[in-house]
Amino acid sequence: MRYTDVAIIGGGLAGSTAAAMLGRAGIPTLLIDPHENFPFDFRVEKLSGGTQVDLLHKTGFADSLLRSTTHDGENWIARAGYLLDKRPSQQFGIMYDALIMAIRAEIPKPAELVHAKVTDVSTSDDRQKLTLSNGESISARLVVLANGLNIGLRRNLGIERQIISACHSISIGFDLAPAGRAAFAFPALTYFSERPSGRIPYLTLFPVGTKMRANLFAYREADDPWLREMRHKPVETMNAALPRLRRVTGEYTVSGDVKIRPADLYVSTGYRQPGIVLVGDAFATTCPVTGTGADKVLTDVTQLCNVHIPAWLATEGMSEAKIASYYEDPVKQACDAWSMAKAFSFRKVTLDRGIYWRAQRLARFLAWFGKGNLRRLRKAISAKTHAHSSSSSSSSSSSSSLSSSSLSSSA
């Protein structure tokens, strides 16, 4: 039997981040995951500036982690073949397995990794017992369940999931390369839907290392033949779905495998139990289309590790009433509600043909177009001002030189 304060089940984004934060706080922690080298998984492939980077800074290792990513610097916005804006961007591309390994490199003592599967968990108001696939047993004051979509252990504990929207969206990932050219003209690109019938909210292209990664999102059924066509004939299928895309990208090819992942929206039920707490997808899923998945995971983990776990460990026991403070955390609740609302509004603005949603699509188009024009105008004025300033400086320098020459001649 090994003893620890916190045992984390699952070593993905939520679990590895929690282990690194708790280790930095000096809290004895065991991160339990079967993968010594995390395998490829089509999940979070970029982190966005603003809230996600702000949340990363709350972990204490943002700077070192971001050094493992590829920063785009500028993102082009386009729709229906028209370039609307070139805006400064803080997107950081990194493949999910590389992201997890970079976070694990930040896990210090007294946190440790245990490479095994958890086969059983029993909980109580005091200590929790975990049985591992390698025959080992662990006694922990608290169990953090961060094993994503895996429902086996949750069902053993009486925790079920309530489907809110089955196959709410589908994510498609692949590498895109320019045909007959060395590189694309843009550092990164977000290309929005051309028409509701295409059932595509947007395509995002962003650099990861030397490659241009593509994430295409669609609202379709999991058995839609279109997905099979996308897997086997991606270029032809994309050209049919987004016929004006090549006005912005030029001709392109798709290299490597095409990964397809349907996403259900669900929330957990029966999770209020002593000794165990759920984070990330183990608690509730979000829609990848919204880009809020990392926000939700990092909010769960930073609130749990910075606020709740230190308070829980400061007193005896690990009752259900104690654990409830995390689920009732207003910061967590606000993030969950925002993420879920965005999942449904994004689908509506893509597919709904009603007057309100048609007006929403037009308003967004005009907003992007207006911002792009304003940005271009500011750049033109700035360039003109800079040119005038340089010209004035050059004239002043020339006059000074002529004056010096005249004085020298007179002498």
Image: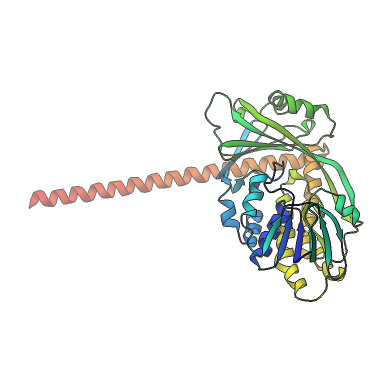
Q: What percent of the width, then of the height, locates residue 27? A: 69, 68
Measuring from the top left, give residue 36's x and y in whole percent: 68, 49
How many discs appear? 0
Residue at (52, 43) in percent of width and height: 377
Asked if 325 appears above or below 378 in the picture, the reply is below
Q: Nearer the viewer, residue 305 or 89?
A: 305
Residue 49 is at least partly visible in this image: no
Identify which residue is drawn at 63% across, 55% down: 53
Give residue 196's position: percent from left, percent from top. 78, 33
**Which of the 4 image quadrants contains residue 3?**
bottom right
Q: Nearer the viewer, residue 190 or 103?
A: 103
Most extreme residue toward the left is: 411
Colour setup of the view = rainbow
Q: Work out which residue is located at the far bottom of the displayed protein and give it.
A: 315
Is residue 236 positioned above or below 355 on the image?
A: above
Left or right side of 223 for 7: left
Q: In the rendered image, is residue 232 in sight?
A: yes
At x 87% / y 68%, what residue is drawn? Answer: 320
Nearest the viewer among 198 and 370 is 198
Task: Please state the horizontal and vertical placement of residue 381, each as a whole percent of the image.
Answer: 47, 45
58 vs 42: above or below? below
Judge left or right: residue 156 versus residue 112: right
Quarter of the image holding residue 299?
A: bottom right
In the rendered image, the quadrant that contains the N terminus is bottom right
Task: Please indicate whether residue 161 sits to the left or right of residue 175 in the image.
Answer: right
